[in-house]
Image (spheres, rainbow, N blue to C red):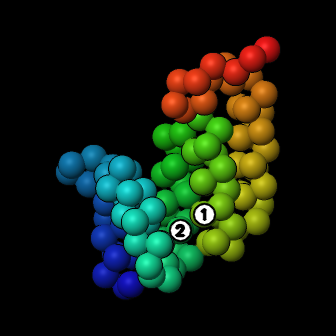
């Protein structure tokens, strides 16, 4: 887990010569959390990246909220939940492109 944390910190750094590797970290956390116990520090890095790149997708804010919660950051988790709720209110489609009835 220490090696994974070191990788995540380096890959999330703006000094990374390849740029911030947000999709690699997010995908890795999604995959590994199904079978392993992920450290709160890794969840915190993942949550921050999801929140930064969420755009207007409410499901991304819900995921960021869950990861902040698992990282022990209740304040950030609540903030993301509220933002996700606001995004749901104005959403015209879900992330699969299905349109909602008005």
The Cα–Cα distance between marks 1 and 2, rounded to whole angstroms, is 5 Å
**Residue at x 76% of width, y 66% of height:** 74
* Position in image of residue 29 (x %, y %): 43, 65
**The furthest residue to the left:** 17
Camera sees residue 95: yes
Q: Which residue corresponds to mark 1?
A: 67
Question: Is 49 above or below relative to 74?
Answer: above
Quarter residue 28 falls in: bottom left
Graded by Cα atoms within 10 Å as few (under 14), some (14 to 19) or many (20 or more), the crowding at tag 2 reads many
- Count up the numbered dots: 2
Specify the farthest residue to the top.
102
- Residue 8 x/y as whole percent: 36, 67
Is residue 16 found left or right of 41 in the rendered image?
left
Q: Quadrant of the C terminus?
A: top right
Is tag 1's residue or tag 2's residue first in the polypeptide sequence?
A: 2
The percent coordinates of residue 26 (x first, y second) are: 42, 56
Query: What residue appears at the point 45 percent right and 81 percent down from the top-left corner?
Result: 36
Q: Which residue is mark 2?
A: 43
Q: Secondary structure at mark 1?
A: helix
Q: Are marks 1 and 2 in contact (CB under 8 Å)?
A: yes
Return the residue nearer the eye: 33 or 80.
33
Q: Is residue 14 visible?
A: no
The dot on residue 58 is: none
Residue in the picture at 68% in, 73% down: 72
């Amino acid at each position: 887990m220490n090696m994974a944390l070191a990788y995540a910190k380096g890959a999330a750094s703006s000094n990374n010569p390849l740029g911030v590797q947000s999709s690699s970290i997010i995908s890795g956390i999604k995959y590994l959390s199904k079978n392993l116990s992920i450290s709160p520090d890794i969840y915190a890095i993942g949550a921050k990246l999801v929140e930064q790149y969420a755009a207007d997708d409410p499901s991304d804010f819900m995921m960021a909220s869950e990861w902040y919660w698992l990282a022990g950051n209740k304040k950030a988790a609540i903030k993301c939940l509220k933002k996700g709720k606001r995004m749901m209110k104005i959403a015209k489609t879900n992330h699969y492109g299905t349109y909602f009835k008005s």
